[in-house]
Image: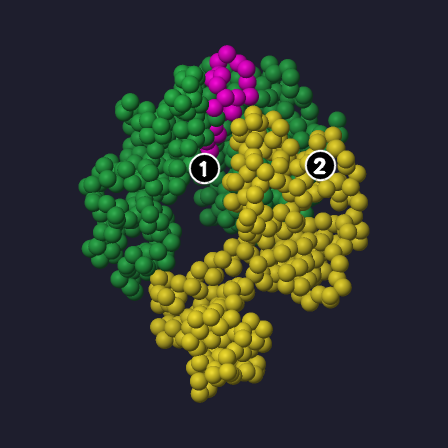
Amino acid sequence: MTPDGTNDSSTVVYFYDGTLEGFFSAVFDAYTGKDRPDIITVSENYQSRIDQIIHHVQTREDKYERVYDGIIKHIGPVGYHKVRTVFLSPSPDKDTILFRYLEYGFKVGKKIHVDISHELVNPVERLKKETWFEMHRMKMFARFAQMDNGVYFSKINPKCNVLPLVMEHFARRFNVQPFVIYDENHRILGLYDMKSWYLQYVDDDFEVPDCAEDDLRYQRLWKSFYDSIAIEERVNHDLRRNFMPKRFWSNLTEMSFIDPKDTIGHLGLSDSSSGSVVAHDELLPPEQRALPEQDASLF
Amino acid sequence: MDLQDKLALLTSAAKYDVACTSSGVDRSAQGGALGDAQSCGICHSFSADGRCIALLKILMTNECVYDCQYCVNRASNEDAVRTTLTPQELAELTIEFYRRNYIEGLFLSSGVIKCPDYAMERMCMAISLLRNEYRFRGYIHAKAIPGASSESIDRMALLADRMSVNIELPSQEGLKLLAPDKHKHSILEPMKHIRDGIKENKSDLVKYRSAPKFSPAGQATQMIIGATPDTDFQVLRLTSSLYRSFELKRVFFSAYVPVSTSELLPRNNAVPFLREHRLYQADWLLRFYQFDVNEIINESDPYLDPYLDPKCNWAMNNLDRFPLEVNKAEYEMLLRVPGIGVTGARRIVRARRTQNLTFEHLKKLRIVLKRAQYFITCGGTFAADTPFAHDAIYEKLTTDSSKQRGFREVMQARSAFEQLALFDDTAMLPHREDVQKSLTGQL
């Protein structure tokens, strides 16, 4: 069953505002209202049919509170954490999946955490893993550059809306330096001003700022380190791409750095800035050189 | 020489030290200090050879008075350009890389400049700068130099998170031949001292919670594979005893890459990748799957099977223990099923408390049924496409597994290439089956 209506035999559809509070309000309505929803989603994602019953959920704080309490009571803080995490997933079905999960959780209680092969539980466990891993990848692959005003700036493009999860990690680790993380996919800024961190939506005309001249020095040094650490005889682009998919490369200094002062730098680095052909390639005998990348999947 | 050139040179000199993790220590952030450490470890990048980059891995200097034949920095290598980083330069690099989220911390080693204790002293200056002046709370992995005094080691262990002393060569003969400056006891004594220090520290910490920590992420080491004729049996036996008696956290294996023209080392250019891979698989069995080293390998058959990973190999040699009923078998036996990993086994034990598991359920739990199907039943049903018999299953495992396919192509290509030297006429190129047969000794 998909939000675009194919193979969709549902009759009752709930539309909500896309926020977590709105989603919990939808769950509240499902239990107190007349019609149990077959689908819960945001109206932008779904083309409703004329024969379906549509219900627009009113987001209210008391509804949110009631459902929150219910979740803690039946499936515990662990359950709440799972719901909270899966909610950040980009999957269009996540709301319906979560709703069915909660229905089951309200029925069986904490046993739900053990019953992981159950058809209503398994999708949530799977989505939670995917979302958590995307967050972990942001911890791995976010790169900062210092701007002229001393603030460290980073741009990320995560599939899931993980900036709230990731700000906590960086605010602790980098508590001695002010920083900004820009989630370009979700148009949100995470700001840390040395006291606390907060989120802010971004204007349409927002531009990624330039880094300080000084910062280029460290980018150059990092690129130099990156190129030197590989053992030529072990070059394996497939393995690297497996661990570090190409969709991350544009934000990684070591894969995308183009030195402004460089034509051919003294380490011959400029060719390797595209990432697909490493400078070391020339050192390999012909049969071992990597073929030009055919990326059918820039996953 | 400018900093960038020094960095490139000293990084390149350090790259054969394969230890890569930033794991084993939780150190929470503190207001006013930079950094923290997370025990799961965080990889920040992956180099062109596919290895993870978590730390700034570098030598303090590549000047060395030792002459270990397998090492690119050996004293007799006149082609090597020698350089040194000051403690200040090293600390600055670490801090600035860390601030930009390039790294989790520092991995510091050194050539033996003047003597082991002098080299250790220089390293300690850099690490002490990081810990005390910069108040750095990230991860530091420091190498102890063979032959260093206990005092040097103590000083370093109180600053670093993990220590290692590289054994490099798995046997005494190899050591004598290739690294005459490193006597066996100059490697083992520091390792024992670190082990004892860690043990003592653990009991101190029980008494005084704020006692300074002594190498809290434990100790590791490395062995070079393929530089000497040592067998897999010798390597694994040593590995197992290192885990037991030295309480190491990790043993790393580094496939020998010919960096030396020494007469004493193998000349061919083939890097023993598969052998290294099999050894890591065996290492995992020792650490996570509760295997004893004698179950994996023995003296009469001292090399690991190239066609089957060690776990499959054990299962095939012990088919009388299978098939296991997935809903009833104990956790320890589930671990032994090819295709069921530690996570899979845990999931099965969890999920079967509420449901009788079928093959559909196992798929949802991400069990690799392609392999596991030959060794398990669900509710009594054996669902594999072959009868439960040794040869039939062996055939399937060696032809179906996609990992094996990759390996076979390499072997066949090599073999075909070698065969070409015998045949002038390319029409006489041997068939795939013939190559396969010649590899398995049937021809």
Where residue A128 appears, as percent x and y from the top left, is 48, 61
The image quadrant of residue B360 is: bottom left
Q: Which residue is mark 1?
A: B250
**Lateral position of residue B253 relative to residue B77, left or right:** left
- Residue at 52 percent of width and 25 percent of height: B257
CA distance for labels 2 and 1? 37 Å
Q: Quadrant of residue A185?
A: bottom right
Location of mark 2 (residue): A270
Q: Secondary structure at mark 2?
A: helix
Residue range of the region highlighted in magenta in the rendering: B243-270
Report how many numbered discs are placed on residues in the image.
2
> Which kind of residue does numbered mark 2 sit on?
Ser
Q: Is residue B78 above or below residue A299?
A: above
Query: Does B263 lie within the magenta span?
Result: yes
Name the residue at 69% across, 67% down. A201
Q: Residue at x 71, y 65 (%)?
A: A202
**Is residue B298 rendered magenta in the image?**
no
Which chain is green in the rendering?
B
Whether labels 2 and 1 belong to a single chain: the reply is: no
Q: Position of residue A125 (x, y in %)?
A: 43, 62
Give residue B376's position: percent from left, percent from top.
Answer: 25, 50
Mark 1 residue type: Arg
Question: Camera-side residue: A142 or B419?
Answer: B419
Q: Are marks 2 and 1 in contact (CB under 8 Å)?
A: no
> Residue A124's quadrant in the figure?
bottom left
Q: Considering depth in this image, is B13 or B438 the residue closer to the camera?
A: B438
Q: Which chain is yellow?
A: A
Instruction: Give the crowd class for mark 1: few <14, some 14-19, many >=20 residues within 10 Å.
Output: some
Q: Chain of mark 2?
A: A
Is A246 situated left or right of A128 in this image?
right
* Residue A55 image label: none
